[in-house]
Amino acid sequence: MANKQRQAVGFTLIEMVMGIVAFSVVLTIIIGVLSPQATRSVTPIMNVRASELAQSLYNEISAKAFDENSGRGGANVRCNEDLDGDMAFTSPGEIACSLVLGPDAGEAGDKELFDDVDDYHGFSAVVNSFNDVVSQDGRDLYAGFGVSISVFYDGDFDGDNDLLEDPTSTGRHKLITINITTPLGQTFIYSAYRSNY
Ligand SMILES: [Ca+2]
Ligand SMILES: [Ca+2]
Ligand SMILES: [Ca+2]
Ligand SMILES: [Ca+2]
């Protein structure tokens, strides 16, 4: 029987280099295919959470008084309530709705002090920088989400700020618009009216 010389098993250096190159190419292709899918699979989750956040903010805002002056003319009297029918809001027990939107005296910078819906006008934040809406049990539920809010009189329901058209126009309805930007950069706009009830 011929005494065969035992052949060396294993890879040469060139084979190893070629293998590494081939593996790198395949890995690049796989990542290229999977990455967009991963982003697409996250997008619906972000959309749902944006919607939840907007709903949470709307619930918070709409629970406030219609206006800073609501209830100030007397018990349970709405602002712009013309009790005596003289087309003015200056008689005893009457008070006009405020002409200035935004936080009122002593309220600016502290959302906890907001007590009427237009106090949120001009509010913006990266969500995890304010507490009650965002954190639950110490966790940031909406880290990286951005919020900006506008609230103004829109008695004619045209989506435009009535006070910009007429600086004395205080209608019965305020349009609340909540813009939510997800960590992926998508912006969603939610809007709803709050009436003077
Ligand atoms: Ca009156
Ligand atoms: Ca206020
Ligand atoms: Ca206000
Ligand atoms: Ca309008």
Image: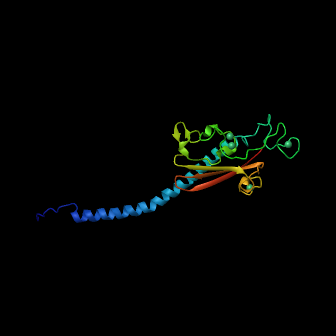
- Vertically, is 161 above or below 117? below
Give the camera-side residue of 178 and 95.
95
The percent coordinates of residue 147 (x first, y second) are 58, 49
Residue 141 in the figure: left or right of residue 117: left
Nearest the eye: 109 or 21: 109
Q: Quadrant of residue 44?
A: bottom right
Name the image quarter holding the N terminus: bottom left
Residue at the image position 61 percent from the left and 55 percent from the top = 188
- Looking at the figure, which quarter contains the C terminus? top right
Question: How far across and how far down the image is residue 129, in percent?
Answer: 53, 43
Q: Residue at x 56, y 56 (%)?
A: 186
Split into quadrants, the picture shows ligand 2 in the one at top right
Residue 175: tell me if it is visible: no
**Closer-to-camera residue (53/108):** 108
Residue 15 in the image: state x and y as whole percent.
Answer: 25, 65
The reply to whether residue 17 is visible in this rendering is yes
Question: Between residues 45 and 18, which one lies in front from this camera angle?
Answer: 45
The colour scheme of the drawn protein is rainbow
